[in-house]
Every structure is written in structure tokens, then in C-alpha cells.
Amino acid sequence: MILAVAFYLAALSDFVYVLASPPDLDWHTALRKVESVIAFAVVGLAAAWWLAGRRHVTLILILGMAAYSALIEIGQSYTGSPEGWRLHILDVACGALGGYIASLIAQALRLREG
């Protein structure tokens, strides 16, 4: 939970935005999307450990990370994000992808433990 709150606050920070993907890079938007998928996978992996042993973990992680991403998009809208609705939708898709990647990593780790 603390990890999710920390990532949420970082996502709303202009300082973190510029630090993580400097706007003077031609490909800063693509870099930001890759970073977001990684961040959602990290948060999703933490959630996967909490959900261990439950049914439909993959679906829960995909939908959960998409919902978490949507909350970030709402927060960013209130803090003056210049992104339009198309990028907001892409960001929510990045959240879902991060959740799916987290489920794959969690499954692989469980296979090695057993």
C-alpha cells in the first residue's frame, strides 16, 4: 500500500516527471510510457504477493492496475496535466499491461518455489 501511495504521489509530481523523462528528449513520451508499465508491474507484483493463493489473480491484477492508473490520470487532470484523453486511455492500458506482466512474474516465481 505504501508503495502504491508513493508511486501515486510521484506520478503527480512535475519534478519527477521532468527527472524521469526530460521534455527535451524527442522520445520522452515513449520513455514515460515504458517507465509507467514498469512502475505498474512493480506495484502489481507487490499486490500479487498479497493476493497469493486467491483465484483469478491475473484478472484482478490487470483490472486493479488499470483502475489504479485511472486514479492517477484523474489526479493528474486535477494538477494540470497537459495530456489529452487519448494519452489518458493509453496510460490506463499501460496500467493493465503492467498488471499482466506482474501476474506473469508472480507465476514464474511460484513455479520456481514449488
Image (spheres, rainbow, N blue to C red):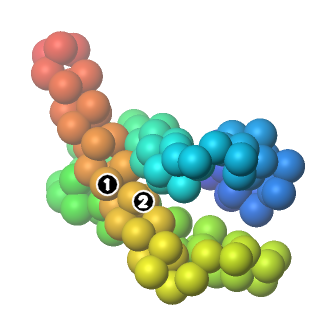
Residue bearing mark 1: 97
Query: At which x and y percent is residue 96?
Result: 34, 61
Q: Determine whether the residue tagged by mark 2 lies in a helix, strand or loop.
A: helix
Category of crowding for the residue at label 1, using alpha-carbon neighbours closer than 10 angstroms: few (below 14), some (14–19), many (at least 20): many
> Mark number for residue 50?
none
- Distance (Cα) linking label 2 and label 1: 5 Å
Up the image or down, 8 lies above or below 38; here it is below
Q: Determine whether the residue tagged by mark 1 lies in a helix, strand or loop.
A: helix
Q: Are marks 2 and 1 in contact (CB under 8 Å)?
A: yes
Residue depicted at 72% across the width and 75% down the height: 81
Q: Is residue 5 visible?
A: no
Residue depicted at 81% across the width and 56% down the height: 13
Up the image or down, 41 lies above or below 10; here it is above
Category of crowding for the residue at label 2, using alpha-carbon neighbours closer than 10 angstroms: few (below 14), some (14–19), many (at least 20): many
Q: Give the amino acid at mark 2.
A: Gly
Q: Give the amino acid at mark 1.
A: Leu
Q: Is residue 49 visible?
A: yes
Query: At which x and y percent is residue 64?
Result: 40, 64
Query: At which x and y percent is residue 17?
Result: 74, 51
Residue depicted at 42% across the width and 59% down the height: 95
Kindly indicate the quadrant of the structure image that contains residue 8: bottom right
Residue depicted at 45% across the width and 81% down the height: 86
Residue bearing mark 2: 95
Query: At which x and y percent is residue 72?
Result: 62, 69
